[in-house]
Image (cartoon, rainbow, N blue to C red):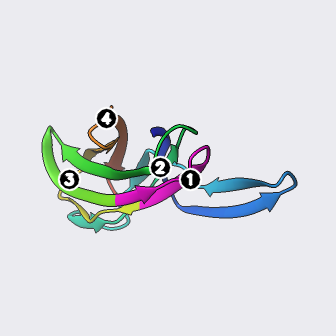
Amino acid sequence: MDIVAAVFIEEMEMRSVPGPSTRIDLTGVHFSLAAPSALPVTLEPHLLVLVRCREDESGQGALEVVYQRDGEQVARNVQPLQVEPGKFNYRLVRAQLEFTEPGTVEAHCRLDQGPTTVVPLTVLAPVD
């Protein structure tokens, strides 16, 4: 299985179209945001990880996301993943991330100890 994409989002919606086929509508894809209040603040951003499974694969695996700040782990999420062979699936991953100052956290995403996809999230100072 492969990670096709990993992005931080505000919302997502699934819909069917002729074919039959499925569409995933993503709203508010972002890689930075202003802190919603004075720092320190704890955020729980939605990370969407889209995965595909080839026809000749079992479709069973584990998705691991390790959140790092300056090379140190600040949160971790591991969850089983099942994808029908020849199809796509997704997972929404949330973690509680504390920010005491503006900065960047990187979500390191991988399937079954495979290659890592890194997605940054930068928190900016709150807007006055």
Nearer-the-camera pick, 60 or 52:
60
Q: Position of residue 73 (x, y in %)?
A: 14, 48
From the image, state whether disc 4 or disc 3 is nearer to you: 4
**Residue in the picture at 61% in, 43% down:** 86
Crowd tier of the residue under label 2, counting other residues whose Cα lies within 10 Å: few below 14, some 14–19, many 20 or above: some
Sequence order check: which comes first, mark 4 or mark 2? 2
CB within 8 Å, label 3 to label 1: no
Give the residue number, with chain letter if any, for mark 3: 101
**Residue in the picture at 72% in, 54% down:** 23
User: Any magenta on residue 83?
Assistant: yes
* In-image side of 88 versus 6 (left or right): right
From the image, state whether disc 3 or disc 1 is nearer to you: 1
Q: Secondary structure at mark 1?
A: loop
Of the residues shown, which amino acid type is indicated by label 4? Gly
Magenta-tinted stretch: 80-92
Quarter of the figure with residue 128: bottom left
**Residue in the picture at 35% in, 41% down:** 120
Cα–Cα gap, marks 2 and 3: 41 Å
Of the residues shown, which amino acid type is indicated by label 1? Glu
Give the residue number, with chain letter if any, for mark 4: 114
Cα–Cα gap, marks 4 and 1: 19 Å
Cα–Cα gap, marks 4 and 2: 14 Å
Of the residues shown, which amino acid type is indicated by label 3? Glu
Sequence order check: which comes first, mark 4 or mark 1? 1
Mark count = 4
User: Any magenta on residue 32?
Assistant: no
Sequence order check: which comes first, mark 2 or mark 1? 2
Of the residues shown, which amino acid type is indicated by label 2? Gly
